[in-house]
Amino acid sequence: DARVTQTPRHKVTEMGQEVTMRCQPILGHNTVFWYRQTMMQGLELLAYFRNRAPLDDSGMPKDRFSAEMPDATLATLKIQPSEPRDSAVYFCASGLVLRGREKLFFGSGTQLSVL
Amino acid sequence: ELKVEQNPLFLSMQEGKNYTIYCNYSTTSDRLYWYRQDPGKSLESLFVLLSNGAVKQEGRLMASLDTKARLSTLHITAAVHDLSATYFCAVDIRGFLDSNYQLIWGAGTKLIIKP
């Protein structure tokens, strides 16, 4: 089965350290999303790409977060420096428009804990 | 303000019972999604509702959309324990091929079905 692959699944780090999360979207999907999920805020859209170009990253704190798609098979989300308030589950999703219907497929997420 | 409100946010019920989760949204849209999330897991697409009056059914779950009332419902028939999960609705304002894509998520309904 085709699926979105995220690494690492879990990350524990100390405040101030750089964190890089990776996502391999489903082959052929041209839209990639980064979401953050917390108990308090629910699901928040951080950034999304279409055909590797960033379309919107307004949900992301620009001073510390950055998102890129170096190629069609890899999306990255970096936090530098990390802070305890960044602790959350980060999901990547890729999307496809098929017969007029849009569908998102989510990865398993990266559980980030910043101490 | 764009809002998607789900209720209830928490539901505990017995197996065999029927119940409905409601999703109200504050702006015009004819695309609505339902997702399921098991604890510690990713989000899985359940239904995509694309027009007024759309009804989709999968097993014991049935989703409907009333765009005039800005309301979607997820109905559970004769609940079984395996349906225990958190259910999210999400309203697509423009579609993710639009450069001003917005997918507004509800807070989720945590459903516990007791054997």
Image (cartoon, coloured by chain):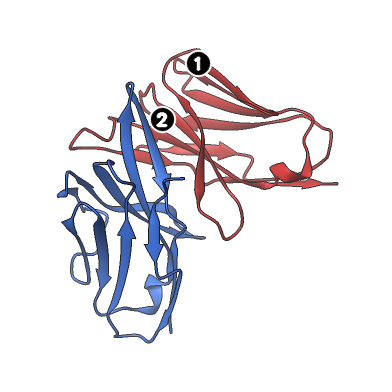
Residue at image position (32%, 22%) is: A100
The residue most toward the front is: A1
> Do pointers 2 and 1 mark residues of a single chain?
yes
Q: CA distance from mark 2 to mark 1?
A: 19 Å
Left or right, B21 with respect to B94, comes to: right
Q: Earlier in the sequence, mark 2 or mark 1?
A: 2
Residue located at (74% from left, 27% from top): B77
Disc 2 marks which residue? B26
Q: Residue at x 40, y 70 (%)?
A: A8
Give the letter of the chain under mark 2. Answer: B
Give the chain letter for blue. Answer: A
**Element type at mark 2:** loop
Viewport quadrant of the C terminus of chain A: bottom left
**Type of amino acid at the residue the image marks with label 2:** Ser
Pointer 1 residue: B54
Q: Position of residue A103 (x, y in %)?
A: 39, 35
The chain in red: B
Q: Amino acid at mark 1?
A: Ala
Residue at 38 percent across and 21 percent down: it is B30
Chain identifier of the residue bearing label 1 in the image: B
- The residue carrying pointer 2 sits among few (fewer than 14), some (14 to 19) or many (20 or more) residues within 10 Å by Cα, namely some
Is A19 on the left-hand or right-hand side of B87?
left
